[in-house]
Image (cartoon, rainbow, N blue to C red):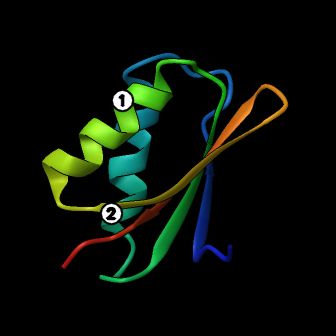
Amino acid sequence: MDANKTLDTRGMACPMPIIKTKKAMDELEAGQVLLVIADDPGAKEDFPAWCEQTGNKLVKMEEKDDDIYIYIEKGV
């Protein structure tokens, strides 16, 4: 899947990945996709909840080795 922007949050603990994600999403236009790469296990629960609260769409989440790849489409 292609992303318009990539944000690497590996090594960051909650809540920093979400804070950085919000800032990155503010720079995108509606319909564009942000790829967040995280290694905090809490991201698997945090990002779906954040997307639901903010009106953004969690397109895909997959684990590769110790990393979690999270694709988020910016809402309108």
How far across and how far down the image is residue 35, in percent?
Answer: 58, 58
Query: Residue at point 44% right, 80% down?
Result: 32
- Mark 1 belongs to which amino acid? Asp
Residue with the mark numbered 1: 46
- Residue 26 vertical placement versus 15 (above, below): below
| Quarter of the figure that contains the N terminus | bottom right
Q: Is residue 10 visible?
A: yes
Residue 17, x across and y down, in percent:
46, 33
Q: Is residue 72 above or below residue 74?
A: above
The residue that appears at 17% across and 53% down in the rendered structure is 54
The residues tagged by marks 2 and 1 sit, at their Cα atoms, a distance apart of 13 Å
* Image-based side of 42 in relation to 62, left or right: left
Q: Residues within 10 Å of mark 1 (few under 14, many from 20)?
A: some
Which numbered circle lies on residue 57?
A: 2
Q: Residues within 10 Å of mark 2 (few under 14, many from 20)?
A: some
Query: Does 57 sit left or right of 65 as displayed?
Result: left
How many discs mark residues in the rendered view?
Answer: 2
Q: Which residue is found at the position 36% from the left and 29% from the top? A: 46
* Mark with earlier residue (2, 1): 1
Query: Can residue 70 be seen?
Result: no
Residue depicted at x 67% and y 30%: 10
Image quadrant in which you'd find residue 27: bottom left
Secondary structure found at label 2: strand
**Residue 34 at x, y percent in the picture:** 51, 64
The one of 24 and 53 positioned closer to us in this rendering: 53
Q: Amino acid at mark 2?
A: Lys
